[in-house]
Image (tube, rainbow, N blue to C red):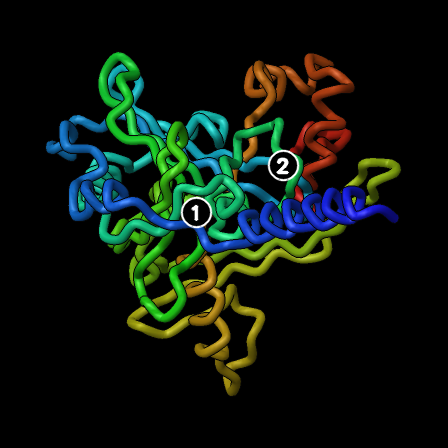
Amino acid sequence: MSETQKTITFGIGALILALLALATAPRLVSPDAFLDRGEPFFPEFNDPNVARTLSVLEFDEETASARPFQVTNRNGLWIIPSHHNYPADGADRLAQTAAGVIGITRDDFRSDNLADHEALGVLDPSDEAATSLRGRGTRVTLRGNNEITLADFIIGNQVEDRPNFRFVRLPDQKRVYAVRMDINLSTTFSDWIENDLLLVDQNSINQLVLYDYAIDERTLTINDRDTVTLKKMEGAWTDDGRTSANREIDAAKVGGLVAAIDGLAIVGVRPKPAGLSSSLQRAAEGGITRGEVASLQSRGYYLTRDGDLRSN
């Protein structure tokens, strides 16, 4: 190899090493990155009561799909569109959430490198072009009247060794901040509704009628095995005369049953098929369709040959 060739070879090698060093060297953070430290994310959003819609989008890594939750005020009524427009007790809770959003500030700058977004958990969960299933954050959007966006941000991973701090990024920006989060944010359906199913006080229950029956799902016939009526009189439970005089009703078991009835809570909803109520009223005359019957049976309800609707 000639001296010229050696010189060229060494020059190329030095250039490669220099490029590698440049690529792997820590990025220098410019002083401008800290200019907005301590500033609020949404300075124009200062009244929590103007919020009319909360949208929360989470990402389920197991199913590789986004999981939406939304509560909104439509024509003066609070509803949950993500749960079949079920009525919500949304005003107070949404105002609390909005107040927490108003209070978040850019506490500490962390990164403006796109390559860091996955590790910090601030990838947009709605970004269908993103290939990674990991590192997706929770996108929170608050809107006011006329769908005006009041706040829109992505909550990422918890900041190590800093309780109540999370990484936060605005969807249209690269910068990631460490932010103290004191937001009352819940996507649990039962937190936004009146979840007491019966709205009954167990102390007001003075009579229980227990039906013991079995349904033959093939023939849709009922085997009524027994009916027991229990009444509370002067604080003591009695039955309909079948218990002998020297025996008493187990008050603890009855009390447990009453408490269970009082404690029935709504955890989810499914829409009732349109027109089902009127169809059930005409069931004896054949006014219910096979599809409606199948829909009921899939949920554990059976329409008997006598026109009774029973659960099984």
Residue at (53, 44) in percent of width and height: 115
Q: Position of residue 69 (x, y in %)?
A: 45, 35
Q: State the separation of the CA atoms marked 1 and 2.
A: 18 Å
Q: Amino acid at mark 1?
A: Thr
Q: Nearer the viewer, residue 18 or 193?
A: 18
| Relative horizontal placement of residue 74, taking residue 56 as reference (left or right) | left
**Rendered location of residue 113, percent (x, y):** 45, 42
Determine whether the residue tagged by mark 2 lies in a helix, strand or loop.
Answer: strand
- Find residue 281 and report its horizontal and vertical position in percent: 58, 19
Residue for badge 2: 65
Crowdedness of circle 2 by 10 Å Cα count: few (<14), some, many (20+)? some
Label 1 vs 2, first from the N-terminus: 2
In the picture as drawn, the residue positioned furthest to the front comes out as 3
Q: Which mark is residue 188?
A: 1
Mark 1 closeness class: few <14, some 14–19, many ≥20 residues within 10 Å: few
Q: Nearer the viewer, residue 300 or 175?
A: 175
- The residue under the point 26% across, 17% down is 148
- 249 versus 96 height, above or below: below
Label 2 amino acid?
Ser
Q: Which dot, 1 or 2, sits closer to the camera?
A: 2
- Give the number of the disc on residue 217: none
Quarter residue 79 falls in: top left
Q: Secondary structure at mark 1?
A: loop
Mark 1 and mark 2 residues within 8 Å of each other at the beta carbon:
no
Res. 197 in view = no
Q: Which residue corresponds to the image point at 26% horizontal and 55% vertical from the top-left? A: 180
